[in-house]
């Protein structure tokens, strides 16, 4: 596997991944097994696609060396005294961490490889995403989990809350107390939680979060959101300029890449897609347009997108945390002091409609709005196995889609391939009835 480190944008130098992984205390033997599967999966899922945009090269390269490139950069940052914070949820505000001179990185948990390791600590009937979180940490097979100085959790679903208690036995972990409702007092409370996070990151990094730094980082993260929004707008074109599987990869990389470099690479991709839209290039002529909603798809989970896009469909939008929930709505940039900025951050993040909130009818409104905007022929709602909140919400979402005349298919699945054939049949049949 190639080993590179980005020193600065554009400049690439060789690095020694094996040494880095050893220094991070990883289980190299087990990690080799994981690395062996990745190239095959990339080949099957990405390289078999026809007419991919040239600007996907960057994202392919990041993926091909997913445990080398970005971890190498973060290790270099740490050598110079930098602190890295690992996060698990779209509600944790990156702006605050970057404003303290730290780096926030999402912690990947999308592989079945990590699930058995998680089952040593959690009941088997726990969501695979949560089991994979624990497996990746305790089995020592993910460099991102090893190099983070601190994890930042949040009180979303019960499974995650309990998993954080277990992770906290092995690494410093701060849990943000996310309200479960969205009343005015909840917005104020979330702002207080963000202030607590500021204190914590200040202590860990030794840097003060100044008004200037926070304002600058609000803008920086907003620019990343704008780039992703631009990408999603282009998918609404009648001729689809990029596959959903490619966009899913971009969204997954968004969680851990350098925000500025990532935004510039997404904008470069969008420039190419704009030309494609104008020239009528269509990567999925005649395919049915699908909006995917539901639970997030952490890297390297491409299972559903791959099945949909090899069964006569093309994914044109994701109402997920590896989709619109991650980037829709900007943080208001007009805050004049720290208090106002923090409240603006709190308000933006509480605009995310996760099923762990009650009531959460705004999520169905989002799905209907996005289905119309992306000209979707149908909605496929996905719930990871044992995720109660999304599974339960799937029923009311189906009802809303019915009322709006939008065909709907609900799916519950995990990270294994055991149900792949059955899903192919169900999804194929659904796509066929879309006419
Ligand atoms: S904002 S979706 S990232 S909590 S799928 S672990 S909810 S049992 S991931 Fe999530 Fe934040 Fe919400 Fe998004 Fe629990 Fe469900 Fe598993 Fe989930």
Image (cartoon, rainbow, N blue to C red):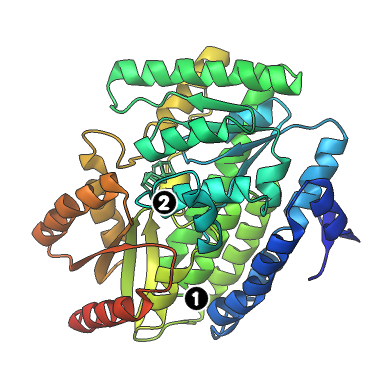
First-in-chain label (2 vs 1): 1
25 in relation to 198, above or below: below
Q: Residues within 10 Å of mark 1 (few under 14, many from 20)?
A: few
Between 44 and 138, which is closer to the camera in this rendering? 138
Is 326 placed above or below 59 here? above
From this viewpoint, is residue 385 visible?
yes
Residue corresponding to mark 2: 324
Q: In which quarter of the image is residue 31?
A: bottom right
Q: Give the image location of residue 205, x and y in percent.
A: 74, 23
What kind of element bears circle 2?
Answer: helix
What residue sits 83% from the left and 59% below the top? 17
Q: Which of 3 and 241 is in front in this view?
A: 3
Q: Where is residue 209 in the image (x, y as percent from the top left)?
A: 67, 19
* Residue drawn at 39 percent across, 86 percent down: 285
Q: How crowded is mark 2: few (under 14 residues within 10 Å), some or many (20 or more)?
A: many
Query: For numbered disc 1, what is the local secondary structure?
Result: helix
Q: In this view, does 278 lie to the left or right of 14?
A: left
- Number of numbered discs: 2
How many angstroms separate mark 2 from mark 1 (CA)? 24 Å
Name the disc covering residue 122, or none.
none
- Which numbered marker is on residue 278? 1
Give the percent coordinates (x, y) of residue 26. Answer: 74, 51
């Amino acid at each position: 596997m190639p080993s590179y480190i980005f020193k600065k944008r554009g400049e690439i130098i060789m690095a020694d991944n094996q040494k880095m992984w050893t220094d991070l205390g990883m289980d190299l033997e087990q990690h080799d097994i994981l690395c062996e599967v990745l190239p095959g999966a990339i080949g099957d899922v990405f390289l078999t696609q026809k007419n991919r945009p040239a600007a996907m090269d960057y994202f392919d390269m990041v993926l091909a060396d997913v445990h080398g490139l970005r971890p190498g950069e973060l290790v270099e940052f740490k050598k110079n005294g930098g602190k890295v914070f690992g996060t698990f949820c779209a509600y944790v505000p990156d702006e605050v961490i970057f404003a303290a001179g730290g780096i926030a990185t999402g912690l990947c948990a999308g592989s079945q490889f990590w699930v058995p390791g998680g089952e040593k600590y959690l009941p088997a009937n726990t969501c695979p995403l949560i089991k994979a979180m624990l497996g990746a940490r305790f089995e020592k097979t993910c460099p991102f989990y090893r190099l983070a100085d601190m994890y930042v959790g949040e009180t979303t679903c019960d499974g995650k809350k309990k998993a954080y208690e277990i992770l906290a036995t092995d690494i410093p972990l701060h849990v943000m107390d996310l309200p479960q409702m969205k009343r005015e007092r909840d917005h104020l409370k979330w702002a207080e939680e963000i202030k607590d996070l500021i204190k914590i990151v200040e202590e860990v990094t030794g840097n003060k979060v100044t008004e200037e730094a926070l304002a600058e980082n609000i803008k920086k993260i907003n620019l990343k959101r704008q780039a992703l929004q631009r990408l999603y707008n282009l998918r609404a074109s009648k001729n689809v300029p990029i596959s959903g599987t490619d966009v899913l990869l971009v969204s997954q990389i968004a969680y851990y890449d350098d925000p500025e470099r990532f935004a510039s690479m997404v904008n470069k991709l969008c420039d190419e897609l704009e030309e494609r839209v104008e020239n009528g290039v269509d990567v999925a002529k005649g395919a049915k347009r699908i909006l995917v909603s539901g639970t997030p798809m952490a890297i390297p989970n491409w299972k559903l997108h791959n099945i949909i896009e090899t069964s006569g469909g093309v994914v044109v939008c994701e109402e997920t945390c590896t989709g619109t929930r991650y980037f829709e709505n900007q943080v208001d940039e007009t805050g004049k002091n720290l208090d106002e900025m923090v409240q603006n951050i709190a308000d933006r993040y509480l605009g995310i409609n996760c099923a762990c909130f009650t009531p959460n009818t705004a999520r169905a409104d989002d799905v209907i709005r996005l289905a119309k905007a992306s000209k979707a022929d149908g909605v496929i709602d996905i719930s990871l196995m044992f995720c109660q909140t999304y599974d339960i919400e799937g029923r009311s979402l189906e009802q809303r889609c019915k009322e709006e005349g939008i065909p709907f298919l609900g799916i519950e699945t995990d990270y294994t391939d055991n149900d792949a054939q059955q899903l192919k049949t169900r999804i194929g049949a659904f796509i066929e009835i879309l006419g």
